[in-house]
Image (tube, rainbow, N blue to C red):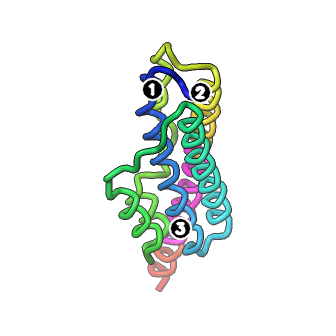
Amino acid sequence: MATKTKPTYLGLLNAIAVGEASAEPFFLAWADTTKDKRLATTLRFVAMREGEHGKAFAKRMLELGYEVRPSNSDFAAKALETAASDKSDLQKFRALKLGKGSPKIDVFDSMFNDKTIDPITGALLGRYIAEERDSTRLLAAEYDRLLAKDRAKKARAAARTTKA
């Protein structure tokens, strides 16, 4: 199923394949280090999606006649180091810049500007975008839950100190 001319969106597919495949290990490492079972479940779910996306986009590139080219970025190694560290979950959310809700405009908004995207790739991109936005919502909800839990704990501690 190789194409005759190099698709203009090949770089996008490669970036997604590389980024998603590199995200799976750090979400799994974080899930393995958190003491919060609910967060661990969410992190494993998001990790599974990331890994699936990485493989799906790599597969699509192969179908088009191209292979994934790895990135020289050290972001993945730094993210894995942070995720596996003994930092608190809130510190990890902040260090990894996760936990914020979906912005009104995001990186996905321009992905369909290329009018040459074929229907198979378009369907794959559509599913990917919807799942990424959902993962963002799931992570934001976990961050908000942990933040509220932390604030309540600090308020109880402050109340005990005031009584003493």
According to the picture, the residue beneath numbered tag 2 turns out to be 121
Above or below residue 127? Residue 135 is below
Q: Nearer the viewer, mark 3 or mark 1?
A: 1
Between disc 1 and disc 2, whose residue precedes? 1
According to the picture, the residue beneath numbered tag 3 turns out to be 30
Which secondary structure, mark 3?
helix
Q: Tell me if 17 is positioned left or right of 69 in this view.
A: right
Above or below residue 144? Residue 104 is above
Asked if marks 1 and 2 touch (Cβ < 8 Å), the reply is: yes
Residue positioned 57% across, 72% down in the render = 34
- The Cα atoms of the two marked residues, 1 and 2, are separated by 9 Å
The amino acid beneath tag 1 is Tyr
Between disc 3 and disc 2, whose residue precedes? 3
Which secondary structure, mark 1?
loop
The amino acid beneath tag 3 is Trp
| Magenta segment boundaries in residue numbering | 136-155
- The Cα atoms of the two marked residues, 3 and 1, are separated by 32 Å
Tell me residue 116's x, y (percent).
50, 15
Residue positioned 64% across, 55% down in the render = 48
According to the picture, the residue beneath numbered tag 1 turns out to be 9
Above or below residue 49? Residue 27 is below
Tell me residue 46's x, y (percent).
61, 53
Residue positioned 60% across, 75% down in the render = 35
Between disc 3 and disc 1, whose residue precedes? 1
Q: Tell me if 125 is positioned left or right of 6 in this view.
A: right
